[in-house]
Image (cartoon, rainbow, N blue to C red):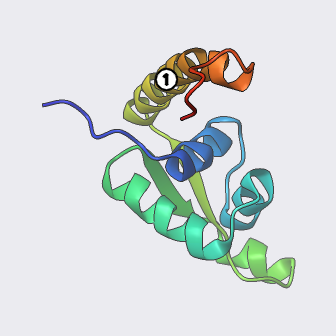
Amino acid sequence: MPRKTLGNTTVAVLNAIAGGVQYGFDIMDATSLASGTVYPALGRLERQGLVESRWEDHARAAAEKRPPRKYYRITGAGTIALTESARRIAELGRALRPLVDGKGPKGGV
């Protein structure tokens, strides 16, 4: 069964995690996406098996006087999905390049 295509937001979140960003607020910073976008995407990625999560030690968070963080890491399936998505995005970019360069159809898009 073919994998469902990941949307741009989901790809951005997954790419941030693959790049070493591990928890929600940092993912928001890395992607410039709002919490109402990032956290639902993280939930979908986890349900799809593309990321795994774990809560940090509560004592560490308490020692730093902040709430515990939930850390995310990309899975093997997530790496494959990200690679496929990057390939798809690159192909789309190549297809749209003539339009960006002003060499596309004269009738407009």
Determine whether, in the image, residue 27 is placed left or right of residue 11: right
Which element type, helix, strand or loop, lies under badge 1? helix
Quarter of the image for residue 76 reads top left
Choose between 77 and 9: the one closer to the eye. Answer: 9
Rendered location of residue 95, percent (x, y): 53, 17
Rendered location of residue 80, percent (x, y): 41, 25
- In the rendered image, which quarter contains the N terminus? top left
Determine whether, in the image, residue 48 is placed left or right of residue 106: left
Instruction: Characterize the local packing of mark 1: few (<14), some (14-19) or many (20 or more) Cα atoms within 10 angstroms.
Output: some
Choose between 109 and 6: the one closer to the eye. Answer: 109
Q: In this view, does 72 lie above or below 24?
A: above
- In the rendered image, which quarter contains the C terminus? top right
Residue at image position (74%, 67%) is 25
Rendered location of residue 41, percent (x, y): 49, 61
Choose between 104 and 59: the one closer to the eye. Answer: 104
Q: Is residue 107 above or below residue 57?
A: above
Q: Name the residue under label 1.
A: 83
Quarter of the image for residue 43 reads bottom left
Outermost residue on the left side: it is 1
Q: In this view, does 9 lie above or below 15?
A: below
Q: What residue type is labelled 1?
A: Thr
Residue at image position (84%, 79%) is 63
Rendered location of residue 83, percent (x, y): 49, 23
Outermost residue on the front side: it is 107
Residue at image position (67%, 60%) is 23
